[in-house]
Amino acid sequence: MSVEQKPEIIKFDKTAYTIYKYAKMDSTNAFLKQHCSSLPDYSVIWADEQTDGRGRFTRIWNSQQGLDLTFSILLPLTSLEQKRRQNITQIAALSVAQMLEGYGLKPSVKWPNDVLIKGKKISGILCEVTETDEKICGVLGIGLNVNNTENFLSGLDIPATSLRCELHHKVVRQDLLKKLLEIIINCFNVLCQSGFTQNRQEIRKRLAFINEQIVFTDVKKDSYSGKIIDLNDDGTLLFKCEKRGTISLNSGEIAFHNSYTMRESL
């Protein structure tokens, strides 16, 4: 496996990203976790084709060579920021949503790590934390359906869409990547400097299924019916459960009217 082209350095304010593009890779997150000690902070691993992408609960991300955008970012973390891994996932979802809004679309954020357009998934996010003797790193992986066709997306197990399907034309993936990296670092800096409050307000404006009847399934596979009431200050979900009253959720899956089932996120 070799870098497809010379690494590109792009700067936004005081942050310099180093973008390494590969033709093919099993998992950009796995690669960054393995090589984090030898790579500079804010390294970006971009794979033109990802063959073994994984999401929450090891779910599969279906990648099409040259059509979607699959990449991971190496974020330097303090011990405090390490505890905000869920928030990093959420600000990445917010960043994707804000980037899509620049194309005239109206995305929503499906807590905690997906972005939807008209109820169809367009992006999935996974944030992992890895430690070396020298540093703590966040590995932020993002998958975005860009030029995928309706024919391919219709064969997936969940409702899905792409920028091409929504805009009715192809989009240059490198332009998308640069736009997204700029928004991500802005949201990440806000999180590091002033906590989750400002990002929370922006996510809440775009929160999918708020005040709608949904089914929540926890990590034990127990399901509960109820309504999303709000997004808490710490990023957990305030949920009014029919059987348990009002509770805060920090993991699990959301099914909308039992019809939206999660099989994959990056």
Image (cartoon, rainbow, N blue to C red):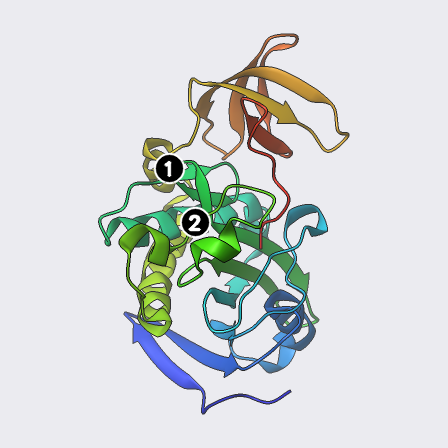
Viewer-nearest residue: 175 or 88: 175
Closer to us: 89 or 148: 148
CB within 8 Å, label 1 to label 2: yes
- Per the image, the residue denoted by label 1 is 118
The answer to whether residue 190 is seen in the rendering is no
Q: Residue at x 62, y 48 (%)?
A: 264
Q: Looking at the picture, how far across and down is residue 148, in whole percent?
A: 44, 61
Q: Quadrant of the C terminus?
A: bottom right
- Most foreground residue, 75 or 237: 237
Q: Is residue 234 visible?
A: yes
Q: Amino acid at mark 2?
A: Thr
Q: Considering only vertical position in the picture, is 256 above or below 100?
A: above
**Picture disc at residue 236:** none
Q: Residue 147: x percent and y percent? A: 40, 63
The kind of residue on which mark 1 rests is Lys
| Disc ID at residue 161 | 2
Query: Is 197 on the left-hand or right-hand side of 221?
Result: left
What percent of the width, then of the height, locates residue 53?
Answer: 63, 62
Give the percent coordinates (x, y) of residue 135.
62, 68
Q: Is residue 110 above or below residue 209?
A: below
| Residue at left offset 65%, top offset 10% | 244
